[in-house]
Image: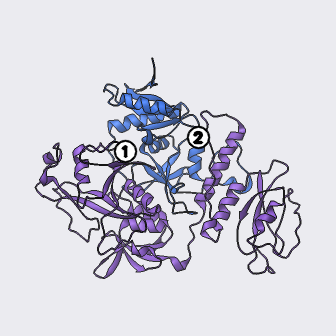
Chain colours: A blue, B purple
Amino acid sequence: MSKGKIQAVAQGGVCGALVWRAEGKWSQRPVHISAGEMGVCSDVYRLRVEWRVVGGLVGALPVQPRQSGQLGLPLHLSPEELSHLLEKGVLELEQETPPDDVITREQETRAAVFGDLWENGFTLTSGLKYGADYLVYQGDPALVHSCFLALVLPWKQPIATLTSLCRVGSKVVKALLLCSVEKGVVQYQTLEWDPIL
Amino acid sequence: RFVHAHTRAVGEEHGSCSVGGVLSVVQSGVCSSNWKDYCRKDPEIVEIVPCRQRPIGSGTGEGGALHVEMLHQMQDSGQAFQEPLAQAALAAMGEKKQDRKLPKGLGEKRLRLEGTPEETEKLHHYLSGQMAAQSAPRATSRRSMSTVRWDLTTQLASVITQKGSHWATHGHTHSGQLVLEPHETLFLMEMGCLEVEIAGGHANLQQVYGTIICDSLTLQEYTVIASLKRSGFVVKRCLVSWLSPNTDSDANSSAGITIDARLELVPSCPLCHPMPPPSSPPLQSLLEVYRPGSKFKKSSPSPPQFRVCVASARDPFPSPSLLSQLAAIQPSSGVTLKWCVVDGPSLTYSTVVPGTIPPPH
């Protein structure tokens, strides 16, 4: 196990990977963390604060297991978050069952869009609740609302649900960010719904 | 900024501690009914966190005395934020289940970041609290812990000892042996009710997850099952199979409901029904969900309140034909079908109402 790398588990039945550890050290001290007992911090929060990867907790919270408002470990990483962190050398996989996934064109496009938006300083989470691919934040999702709904689309294919998506975006004060990959470059277009012209 | 004050044993004088201006303790005569009033009289106490029933490290404390840990406002800044860890740790150690509190949220979100150091500190404070809650030990008394042995070939857990009231709605019997299905085993372990033995050794939660979550019970399906069960619903997992073995895929994609494309539910336990031949279409799983507290009899279960079909956000959408076939599974009267889409930790449910045009609201 490499020093400083976070361990993740890729296993059958999981689309992406799971992070379990709640013990680890900050590789660089963030702005102002309390001294003393709080010097040792979790891998899960290192991913969030140092690497802007939020993931999602899917287990029961030890303090109160019979509620779903706040969940506990393990942290689930989506395939894009996983491949991004592997590329950056932050994460290494504890091989339980090596998944032999065929990387589809769609997965490649999603990974490219995720990586490009991340390089531009944004934080991304699932856009499922708004019918989009990603919610794009300019800071930590706990502090600010998302500014865009990102949709990953094939460059040359007609967009089936354009009007309804624009309306959803406008209702929740978010612009629609259309993302496609054309000749290896990520292309962006923003749509904002015009209520009255 | 807060630091929690340690209280002294009952019987000692009320006094003030010299550490950073922190106020101290509870004197004798303060009992559970009046300690709040006592603390409110002190203008410097801003928050009260009830803790144990017995004083820490006291040899002379009287039985039944209340030990109160109070949060006190610091007069000078520079001291680290200890409150979230303290509260979360206290909450985890709380003897009574109702004392166990969740870590605090951040409140209202803004549209844009302020970019101030206070904001970053607020975030770290929040994340520290979250982390303390994640790191709290899963403590359960031995008296309420059941034990099971996981069988890697049958993919079922044989029950060795049974404790607690959840056995009325979990497990079923095979040749006199009570067994738990994979999702039941994992759920009860997450709730802290179960000890699982795998291959002769006691397994921890990560090992049990690694064994149980696999291609036949995906993480997506389990997150839906666990979410429903945490809310108190009774969940039975079933597999969907075609009634007519000669049904081919053309009948499935036709526009209307055809008689030979009826679906039926079979138990998901592999010992309860024979697995279909590999040439037949793959079995989809469906959840039958019963209202919390309903009279659920394992031997003659009543129709569920609703059924849930779990799908991944990354899979193709269902056709209207498939939705209507799933909704028509017998018994269907009074049983609604819910379609649940999962993307990592996010779940969204939609209720499917088949048939004619519904009456407008």
**Label 2's element?**
loop
Residue drawn at the location 33% of the way across and 47% of the way down: A101
Q: In the figure, is residue B173 to the left or right of A145?
A: left
Residue B125: where, in percent of width, then height? Answer: 68, 49
Q: In the figure, is residue B244 to the left or right of B317?
A: left
**Label 1's element?**
loop
Residue drawn at the location 54% of the way across and 57% of the way down: A21
Using the rendered view, name the quadrant where residue B274 is placed: bottom left
Q: Is residue B128 above or below residue B38?
A: above
Q: In the figure, is residue B306 to the left or right of B165?
A: left
Q: Does residue B100 appear anywhere in the picture?
A: yes
Instruction: Check disc 1 and give the amino acid type.
Output: Ala
Instruction: Check disc 2 and give the amino acid type.
Output: Asp
Residue at mark 1: B313
Residue at mark 2: A140
Q: In the figure, is residue B42 to the left or right of A75?
A: right
Using the rendered view, name the quadrant where residue A40 is placed: bottom right
